[in-house]
Structures are given as C-alpha cells and as structure tokens.
Amino acid sequence: MAPKYTTKKNVYLTKGNRKKAEKKYQCNLCQILTVYTSLVGFKKHLNKITLHKDSSTAVSVDLENNGKIESGFTELEIVIENHMDYYDSCSSDEEDQYENNPRLTEAKTSDADNKITDSAIHMETHMRVLESFSTSMNDYAAGVTVSKSSHQSIEDIFILPSDISPFKSKAEFILHVLFHGDEDLASERLIKKIMYAMEMLLEVHKSARKRIEFSKPDAVINFHLRAKNNVLVFKTSTAKSTNQKSEVHKFSINMPSEYIKNMMACSGKTLQLSALPDFTENQRLHLNQGDKWIESPLLQHPMLTIQGSDYWLCENYTNFAVSIPKYKINTNATIVERFKRRLSGSSLIKVIIFPINMYSDDTSGNDSKQYNVYYSFLIYFAVMTLEEQNKWENTLFVCTCNHVLNAVDMLRPLVDNLVTLQKGIQMYSDDLGKHVLVVAPLLLFMGDNPCQSQLAMHKKTASRRFCRKYLILSPCLDWKHVKGITCFSHVALYDWPQRSKTFLSAFASSDKQSNIYKSEQSLSYVKNGSKEFLRLKAFDPTKDIPIEILHTIPLGLIKYLPVLTAIQKDSLQHELSPYRSYKSYNQTFSNQLHHSGSFVGRDFKQLIQILSSVISKLFGRDSNLTFIITSFHAVSRLASLIYICGVHKGFDNNLLKIRSAVDKVARVFLVLNTFIVSNPKTFQQQDFSFKSKLHLLHHLTKDMFCFSSVLQYKTENSEQFSKFICEHLFKTNCQATSRDVAKKFVKQFICRHLCNRGSYIVEKHIGNNIRPVRLSVGDFVKQAPIDFSKFNLHFFGSRANSKNSDILISNLRDKLADVFQKDNRWFLGKISIETLRDGRGKLVRKMCIMQEYQMISSFNVNTVYSCNIVTDSYDNIKVIYYRTSYEFDKNEVIVAQDIDMHLTLISNSSRRLLNVAKFGMFCWILVNISNIN
C-alpha cells in the first residue's frame, strides 16, 4: 500500500478586518465555478475529483462571503494531502527508470529497482510540500481569491535569463542546493535547511513578483539524466577489475583528473592548490617544507612566474637554480623538456604542479559497523593547510566497493589516471583565463597500518619480517619459545637493510618458480594489486607511506597498557569528573576509555593528556603500578611532542626530543614487560613490548624529516569521512552501491562548485556545428552565498569535521586556565565568571575574576627548562597562588596559550600542577617559559 502524507491545516490571513459570516466553499481544482454551503457537500465533490488524479494533490479552500471579498479578514485554509499511490511507480535506481527513453540512458531494469528508497521518498515528500506551499504563497501574494481565470492563466517563470545560468530558474537553483548540498540525516538539521529554503523562496518571490512553480521532483533529483539538462554533470567512469578469485567485477570511479579539471575552473583555486618548495631553515609548517618536496625532481616547478612573465628553468644549462625570497628551485633540463608543450598557433603552455595525497580504508555498510566491508579511496591536495584540509569540501571521494573487490583490486584504473596526471593534462584555469598543463604527482599515501602494509606489498605486521620499511626479524618469534624470566633486548633499527622500490619491482616482475620470488617471499613480500604503484615515478611505497599516528599511539600503545582494578577505576573516574567542566581542552572529557562509536579515537586522545598526572596522584605509592605509571608518562610525553600543528623554529631540536622520547618509551615498555613476566599471578602475561606499533615509532622522525609534522598527514579527517560513506550506503537499494555512492558525492561536489562561481562547458550550435562553449554561473547564483547570510551554514556547513588534534586558542570563558598577556606581561591565570544580581534576582552584570599563579623558583634543582623551577618527577611544573583574585576587563587581556592547571596536589590545595602532557604544551613551555613572569 502506498504511504500517505498529511499535514496539519495552515491558516493564512489576508489584510483587512475579521468579519464573521456564513462560510461557503468554492473548488479551485475544477473548471466549473460551483459554491457549496456545507462542508459535507464540498468533501464529496473533492472525492470525485481526486479519484481521477494521477499524483498528489494540493487542495486550497476559499471561504467567501456571498462570492465577494468584504472588508475584513478572510480565512484561507490550505490542506496539503498526498493520498495517491504515487510512489509505487517509482524506481530506486535512478538510471533504470529511464530505460524506455533511448535519449537518456540504456540501463536495464531489474526486479529490485521497483522498490523506492527511503531517501527518494523523503525528498519527494518535501518537494510536494514545497509545491503546495508555493501555490498558497502565490495566492496570498496576489491579494485576491483564486478564481477560474486565475487558474487558467498561469505565468511561466522558467525562462532562462542570463543571471541564473545554468539553471532554468531561481527556484530550481535553490532546490538544487537544498538536495545536493552536504548530506543531512538528522531531522533538526533537515527541518532548518528546508525552512531556510522557504525563506529564500519568499525573498525570490517578493523580488520577482511572479508566480513560482517548482520543477518535477525527478527533474531535480536526477537532473543529470535529463535530455535538456544545462547543469554541469561530473563524468563518473565505470571500470572492471579482477579479484584474487579471478572474478571480474565492475565498480564506479570518480577520476582525480576530473576533480582537478573542475577545481581549476573555479576562481581562486589555481593559486590555492599549487606551491613552490619552501627552504626556510629549521621549520616545518607545511608539506612543501619536507625533504621529498624539495629534493624530488618530479615535484619541482619547471617554470616560474615573476612579475607576470613566465620563465622556463634550465634552458641551455645542465643544472640551474633560481632563488627568490623564501623559495628555491632545483631542477634539470631533462625534466623541464618533458613538460614543454605548445597549443596550436601559440607559445609554450604554462605548467602547474599539484601534488596530491591519497587515503584508503575500509568501513562497514551495516548499522552495526560490523561485516559487509566496503573499501574506499579518497584524495587530498597536499598544499592545503590543516584548516583547509579539515573542511568537508576538500575531501574528494574517488571510489568504493564491497568485499568482492578490496583496495588493491581497484588500483589499476586509479593508477592509470595518476600516471596520466604525472605526465600532465591540459586544463582550463579560471584564474589565468587560459589553458595550462597540470601535473599532479602522488606525494604520500595515508591509511591504517594493515592497509599501508598491503599497499606496500608487505605481508602485514604479523609476518616474520614485521616491518614494512626495514627487513627486521620479529623478536617476538624467539621470545615465545623462552620460558620464565627473559632478558629482553632493544630492537636495533639501523642494523638491518632497508626495503627499496628496486626490490619490489624485481619481485613483482619475477616468476613464481624463480629464485628471486622464493627468496623475497621469505622476506615477507607478497604479490597483490599494489604493484600498480610501481608505475608512479614520483612515489616509492617503501618511503612515501608515513607512519599513521592515530592507530599507533592513542589506539595502540595506550590500549596495550594493563588495566586497573574495579576499585582503582572508580577512584580514577571520580578524579576525572571535574575535567568535564574545564575549558582548557577543545572537547568534553569522557570518564572511560571507549573506542566504539569514535572514528577518531577521541576519548583516547583526550585522556592520554591527563591520565599520567591523575594516576600518579592517586596510585603513586602502589609499587605494583610504578612501571605502569612510568609507561603512561613516557607515552604522554611523546604524544605531547608529536601532536603539534607545526614547528616554527627549532625543528632539528624537536626531532632530537622526539627520538629521545621514542627510545624512552621503548625502554620503559621493556622494563614493564619484564616486570609482568616476573609477576604472573598479578598481571596477565603480555608481549606488547615487541608489538609492531611500538617498533614503528622509531620511523617517526625520518617521516617527519621527509614530509612534515605528523598532523599534516593525519587520518582523523578521513576516518570521520567514513560516516558519510556509510550514510550513503544505507540509502541505496544495495544493487549498485558503488555507482550510487560515487554519483551522490559528485553531485554534492558540482553543487558546491557552482556555488563557488565555477565555470562550466555546454554544447551550443554555432552555425552548422556544435561546439563546446565555456560559461559562468549567473549573478543570482554568484550572489546567493553573499545575499543570504546563512546560505553556506545551512547548505554546506552543517556537519564540519571534529578538530581534536591541534592546539586551539580559546576565547575568555569560565574555568579557563591560560597563559595570559596584558601590557607585554605574560602570566599564568585561571578565569571564573560570576554574576551580580539585584535584590529581585535580576541580572545586573557579569564579572570576570582572575586568579594569578606563579612558578616556584629554586636554585637547588636541575630541570629540562631554561630556568630553575620546582617540578615533579615527570617535568610537570608546580605553581602556587600569586596574589588574591581580582576583577579585570576582558578587553585588556589576550590569551597566549591554553594550559591545563586544574590538578591540585594532595599536600597543599593551593598548589597545582601545570600539565606539560597536554598536546603541544611541552614544546611550547620549553620555548616560552622565560617570557612568563
């Protein structure tokens, strides 16, 4: 049975004075003017009419007084109903319903395509509601009752003026962004979005003074299948691949070149996506300051633009270097000559380098987040800052497929496109107003540890040679055969040979019967589809897959540490409870370590910053927990050093501190493992000191030197993007999931592209020929994000990624501890906001109270800091009240750095600990402690 949708009655009042009179009912749906004095007769008349209708009907009822409009209020009741079996004729597969129209598609119809998806029903319903709403709005604006003549003469507003191209009307543009903006499934966000769209329609109606009529729902939802469509359509490709069972399967893929081609046609993107190598010494703020970006020949720009003129490098020279402020280019003539191309009848085409990053992971297509695995690929532009990378719009979806094809099986068509991009593709640049040659080499690959091992042709971390970067023999293989107390030894990293791309190429091209294949297979190499990466000259799988920190420390080492008893957990949770109200962290703290439901390990990353200090305060005297507490402090110190957005100065010194912190973590874990083995009755036996994730930490500094800070290639944003993939999977009919998800993402991409004033190409008749013509969007489309203040918020900004890895500077608020700056004086302080009320309880004003603290000086202690101050055993700084609290003007105080100063010492409540385990805090204190009074 078809679903029915009925809304409540909505009453609109026309101007004038309300006058009580006998109600009469007139039908606006038929052409015969008939007035009914009773509601029963009017309903019988409506039932006869609706029996002959083929779609949902919006019924409007006019209440007249003797057929004339009297002075006074006249009620106009509008009942919006959907009572017909409309949805039974719809198909959930958007292409299959056009089978009978050869102009549109040639797709075949399947039995499952006769079922309508929940998403289509949802969107169809809102379209009908909006359509009925427009009818009542037009009648209301006309100021007269609807008569026979008004219904027979409907004005057509679907004329294509120049200011709304490529859309047929302003209403169509609003509906387009409504349904193809960022996906919103929560009812509150959806209602707000629809209501804001109605407000926009009212504004459009008021300015146009014309009747607004909506397109058919299918014309908006499946606009890309319309024969007379003018809206830009992203070209999604269909590829075939063979899995390990020799089965051939199809999947849909959004090629990276198509993304770049459309982004180049958007104003401001050319300069945003390209950058020269940055040679600023002892600094790492962006990926273009990394060693690979500076040294790799394929990442060098073969030409420079100086004062509006393009200069080619290395002409008539074997090696040539051009130095400009802050940047330096090193390249050679062979690379430059490769990119020299000419357009017909013009000079050499300009070359632009766009390095990209790639990410791959698996996600579940079920609500339970288990089973039904889908593998997907995403791409990012390497030059973007952390703030830009965190935006939803800058995560570009490439492809996905269920368990019939895994990630390595889908690589061939993707790498084919990357090889073409590496050679260069001609594209139109809106910023330059001409065609340029775009070269997009692959800079690095991101993913979790199993995925990275698989794509590096490695047998994963459980193999005998467990490291994907070095040929290190797993030490736990020998340890498992030893009984009793074992003398553990530190893993010597650089005593083993390093894996190389040459070895991978030789193994990939060898026969299974050859000696090369047999010998390298014993070194934990494996043949799979990842050999396709070897075709990329700018990418080395053994070096350009940096260590992924999320699953290595927060979801790795912290989970390895032994758990506490039930009583100890209760004490710990009680001590952590006040942290829920403290504002020194950008996320609300949880009391327990939970990973389920958190894509980015939020709970682990928050608690790793405070657990070490809290556990030391509660259980510092428990001898059984001494080594566990030491391990927590070592891991917390390492996390504080690496979870930083960038290093402005002293990068070499920062690498030394990280290397020292990694060595300390390895040592304390070895000691802890020895202690656990020697106490089998107290602790469960574990060998986590030989875990591969602990070993991978030794590669951190080398990856940071090659690229930049670990947050520049973090995977948290990509992990959060998995929820959008899952939501799109839930809305499909599970028949062509790869195609449906790929097309939904590119519809959102194109919608945002047009709203960002991107140009597009249409086919037009010029004489006897059809030629592509590049057009820009109309004035209304350009001005919509500006004229409507909440346009981007409701249509494109309602679901931003969570940022819980970088250091934030907070605004002044209650219970905030910070390093404050006032009149060039830096000091430690904590804010409390108090309210002042009069005798009747009415708020008079809010007072900002400051409590200052100071570090305790001592000449009898040695610390890691530049000044002699009192610290605990783990370099946390002890502070004490400096003066009595006082009221201050919030406009005179600047927040220099957020700190954690909430933990009080047991012996003296006036003393607190400045927690240097907070992300980025230890490095910041080392540099700026001399400035704090």
Image (cartoon, rainbow, N blue to C red):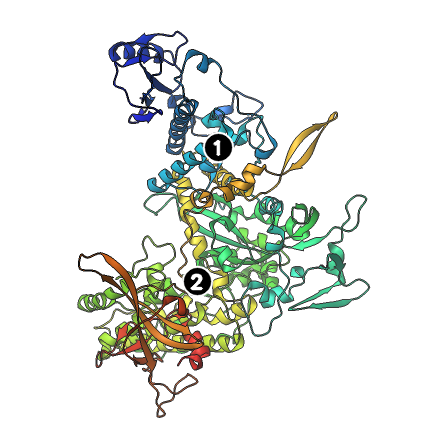
Q: Secondary structure at mark 2?
A: loop
Residue 399 appears in the picture as rendered: yes
Up-down: is 374 above or below 625?
above
Residue on which the image places disc 1: 204
Q: Nearer the viewer, residue 699 or 654?
A: 654
Q: In the displayed structure, does residue 242 sit left or right of residue 842?
A: right
> Percent x, y for residue 461?
43, 62
Work out whether residue 509 can be spotted: no
Q: Which residue is mark 2?
A: 461
| 123 relative to 518, above or below | above
- Tell me which amino acid carries mark 2: Thr
Q: How far, Cα to Cα, is label 2 from label 1?
A: 60 Å
Residue 593 image-quadrant placement? bottom left
Instruction: Please give the label number shown on residue 889.
Output: none
Tell how many labels. 2
Between 770 and 554, the residue placed more toward the observer is 770
Which marked residue is nearer to the observer: mark 2 or mark 1? 1
Residue in the picture at 76% in, 59% down: 312
Which quadrant is the C terminus positioned in? bottom left
Residue 444 located left or right of residue 333: left
